[in-house]
Amino acid sequence: MLRLLGWIFGFGMFVALAGVAVAAVYLTTVSAGLPDYTVLKDYQPPVTTRVHAADGTLLAEFARERRLFQPIETVPPLLVHAFLSAEDKDFYSHGGIAIDGVFRALRDNLMARLDGNTAIQGGGSSITQQVAKNFLLTSEQTWDRKLQEALLAIRIESTFSKDRILELYLNEIFLGLNSYGVAAAALNYFDKALYELTLSEAAYIAALPKGPNNYHPFRRPQAAIERRNWVIDRMVENGYATPEEAAIAKDEPLNVIPRAGGSQLYSAEYFTEEVRRELAKLYGEDQLYGGGLSVRTTLEPRLQEYARKALMDGLIAYDHGKGFRTPVASIEIGEDWGLDVAKIAPLSDVPEWQLAVVLEMGSNEASIGLRPDGLAGGAVADDRIVGTLSGPEIKWVSKPLQDILKVGDVVYVSPVSGKTGIYTLEQVPEIEGALVAMDPRTGRVLAMVGGFSYALSEFNRATQALRQPGSSFKPIVYAAALDNGYTPASVVLDAPVEIRNADGSIWRPENYAQEFYGPQTLRRGIERSRNVMTVRLARDIGMPLVAEYAKMFGVYDTMQPVLAMALGAGETTDMRMTAAYATIANGGRKIVPTLIDRIQDRYGVTVYKHDQRLCQGCEATDWHGQGEPLIVDNREQVLDPMTAYQITSMLEGVVQRGTGTAARVLNRPVAGKTGTTNDYKDAWFVGFTPELAVGVYVGYDQPRSMGSSVTGGTFAVPIFTEFMQKALEGTPPSQFNVPSGMTTAWINPNSGVKAFDGEAAIEEAFKPGTGPNLITSVIGVDVNAFDAIQRQQLMQQQYGSGFTTQPGGQPSQGGANQPVYDRTTGQWVYPGRGGLF
C-alpha cells in the first residue's frame, strides 16, 4: 500500500513537473512574440486637426479617427467613475488582471461549451488588458491572444502609473460615430465638452465600449437606454451616485445630437476646403488627419457672410433675367407627400431656401408642401407644413404659375417677408462666380466665396478657375509704363493699328464701342478702358517688360509676350488678380495671399506663421528705457511707391468717371478696374480701398456669352459695391497715402497740359523731375508722348507723304503741321488742314 501510494505520489509529481515544464515552454513561446510595451511611453494617438477662423470660431475638423487628446487630469471624476463602474471597478487595486473578471469569463466560456458554442467568449478584461489589446495586439479571439493580453497587462502595470494607463484607455477606446476617446465622443454625441456632461450622458458614453453598434442611439435606442441605466446602477452600487440622482438620470432620454462634420460655418465651405488642400500640401495627409494641428485662419466670419450674400444676390439677379427653367424634380404625390419630398436632398449651404412640392395648382398660385426636417438617425419629422406660392410675389417670372409648374413639381421657395404662409419661387442660377476679399497690407484673405453653392459644386472659382481677366489686367501695363518714363498725363494715340501675328495673320484691335478717340492721356485711357491705345502703349514699352511685371505682380507665372496679352487674353484666377491689386494698394510691396495665419502642433508649438516680417527688439527680457520694437517689412518692393500711387489715382478715376461709376455710392476713396472678355464671356471688377482689396469674377463654368449688356461695370461692380457697403459699414473713409516727394498740378483731362483757371481740371501727381505736358504755342502742345513712328505713319496717311518728323518726334514744318489741342472745342485738330486729328 505504501509502495502504491509512493508510486502515485511520484507519478503525480512527474505529471505536475511535466505540466509545469509544458506550461513554461508554452508561456515562453507565447511571450516570445509579445510586442514591446515600452512604446506606450512615446505613444502619440492620431488626433483631430481643428481649423478656426480669425475670431476663434471653429470652422472645420479633419480626421480619419475623430479624437481629441484629453490629459487624465482634465477628465471629470464623474466620467472616470462611470467607466470604472462599467468596465473595471477594481482598477485602482488590482495588478493588471481583474480576478473576478477572469472567473466570470471562465464561467461564460464553460456555459457556451455546454450550449455547443466552441467560440471563445469575450469579456472579463480589465482596463489594463484592454489597453494591451487596443494598442499592442489584434482583436482575434484565441487563447494565445488572451494569454498575451494578460502577460502584457502585468508588465504594463509594473511600468506605468494607474493614471497613465487610464489616460491611454480613455483617449484610445472606440465609442462609435467615428469617435475615438471620450472627448471626441462627448462632442460627437452631445456637442459638449467633458466637463459639461451630465450623469446620464457620462453613463451612456461609458456604456459604449462593450459594442457601440449594439447600443446605437438611433438604430437600437431601447438597448442603449437599458445599458446606460445598468451603468448608472453600478455607479450607485460603487458609491459614485445617489439613488435620487440615479432615478432622475434614468428617466432622461438619450438626447443624442450628432455633431456635423466638415465645415461648421455654412458660408465658408470653399474657404475651409482650400485650407485643407493647403495643409495637405504642407504636411501630408497623415499629419492633416492625425497630427492634431491647431490652425488659425485669416477668415473673418462677418465678412464671409457679406461676401456670400453679395455674390449670391448678383448671380440670382442675373439668372432671374433669364426666366424660369425647370423644377428641381417631379414626384408622384403619395399618401404622405412629406416622405416623398424628404427623399430629395436640398442644398445644405443655402438655408434661406426650402424645397417644396406643388400639391395643388390654382390661377397664378399654387398650394405647396414644405420638405419636412430630417431628424437624427435619418428619420423624418412628423410636421407637414403647407403654404402658398404666390404668382404676384414672383416678380421675375412673367408667365402665370400654371404655365410653368404642375402638381408634383419640386422647387425651391423662400418666405415672403411680412406675409405668413406666403412664399416666392427660387431657382439655382446657372451662372457662377467668385469673390475674394483681402487685407491689402498683409495679403490675409478675409473672405472667399468660390461659387453659388459648395454643396452643388466643390469647384472653387476663386482659386481653381482659370479665366481671362480682360481689361482688369490693364493696370499692370500702365504700371509698367509709369515705372518707365510715362506720367498719367502722357498722351498716347488711340487710332487704328494693325498687328501682324507670327502666322502672318493681321490683328486689328478695337475699342468696346468700335470707335477711335485720337490722342488720349494715360488717365483717360484707363478710365475709359481704351483697348487700342493700351496696345500701342504696350508695344512702345515692350511686351517682355509687361510680361515681367505680370510675373512680379503674381498674375501669371509665365506670360507669352504678345500684344494680345496686354488686353488680358491670358488666363489667371480671381485670387491672383486680387493679390496683384493689393500690391498696388499697399504701395508696391509684393503680396503673397494667405488663408492661414499660424499653425500649432499638438503641443501648442507654432510650426508655421505667415507673417515673416522681422521684429527688432521683440525678444527683450525686460524694459530699461528702450524704444518700441521696430517691425521691418522685408517683403519685395515690386513697384515704385510713387508709381503705385499714380496708378491708384488713375484707378480712382475709373470709379469716378469711367467704367466703374456704380461704386461711387460708397462715398469713400475707391480704386478699381472693370474687365469684360471677348463675346462677353467673363466679367470682372477688382478694386480696393485703403482697408480692403476685393476681386469679383462672374461667368459660366463652360464659357459662353452672358449677353452684350453684361460687362464688368454692369454685373461685377454691383456685387463689389454691395459687399463693400456692408464690410466697411461704420469704418470712417480714409485717403490713399501719397508718398513724400511727389508734386501735384491741375491738368486738363483731355490734353494732359496744365489747366487754365476756370476750365475743367484733374489734380495729377507727378514724380520728381516730371510734370504736365508743355505748351508749345497758344493752342499747341508737346506731343513727345506719341509713338514717333506710328505718329508719322498716321500723319502721312491722313495728310500726305510730305509730313515728316524730326528725330525728337516734333513736326518738321512748325505750327502748320503740328497737331494741337483746341481748348474751345475740346478736340485735337490739324490746323494746316482744318481736320480732326
Image: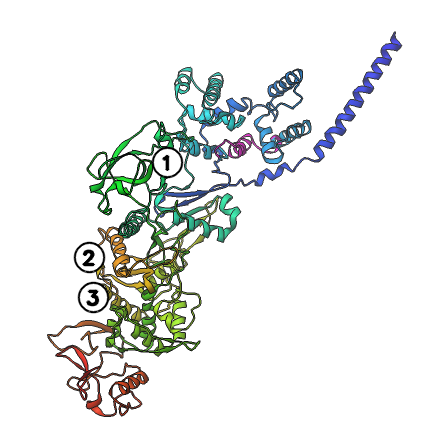
Tell which tag, 1 or 2, sits nearer the viewer: 1
Q: Which scheme is used to colour this image of the protein? A: rainbow
Q: Name the residue type under label 1.
A: Ile
Q: Earlier in the sequence, mark 1 or mark 3?
A: 1
The residue beneath circle 2 is 665
In percent of width and height, residue 792 lies at 29, 86
Q: How far apart are the two marked residues, 1 and 3, measured between alpha carbons?
A: 53 Å
Q: Is the residue under label 2 in contact with that under label 1 (CB below 8 Å)?
A: no
Q: Residue furthest right?
A: 3
Tell which tag, 1 or 3, sits nearer the viewer: 1
* Observer-nearest of 613 and 829: 829
In percent of width and height, residue 741 lies at 26, 73
The residue beneath circle 3 is 657
Q: Main secondary structure of the magenta part?
A: helix
Q: How far apart are the two marked residues, 1 and 2, measured between alpha carbons?
A: 47 Å
Q: Name the residue type under label 2.
A: Val
**Quadrant containing the C terminus in the rendered view:** bottom left
Q: Name the residue type under label 3.
A: Arg
* Observer-nearest of 193 and 353: 353
How many residues crowd mark 2 within 10 Å: few (<14), some (14–19), many (20+)? few
**Quadrant containing the N terminus in the rendered view:** top right
Q: Earlier in the sequence, mark 2 or mark 3?
A: 3
Q: How far apart are the two marked residues, 2 and 3, measured between alpha carbons?
A: 13 Å
How many residues crowd mark 3 within 10 Å: few (<14), some (14–19), many (20+)? some
In percent of width and height, residue 84 lies at 51, 24
Which segment did they paint magenta? Answer: 157-177
* Residue 331 - label: 1
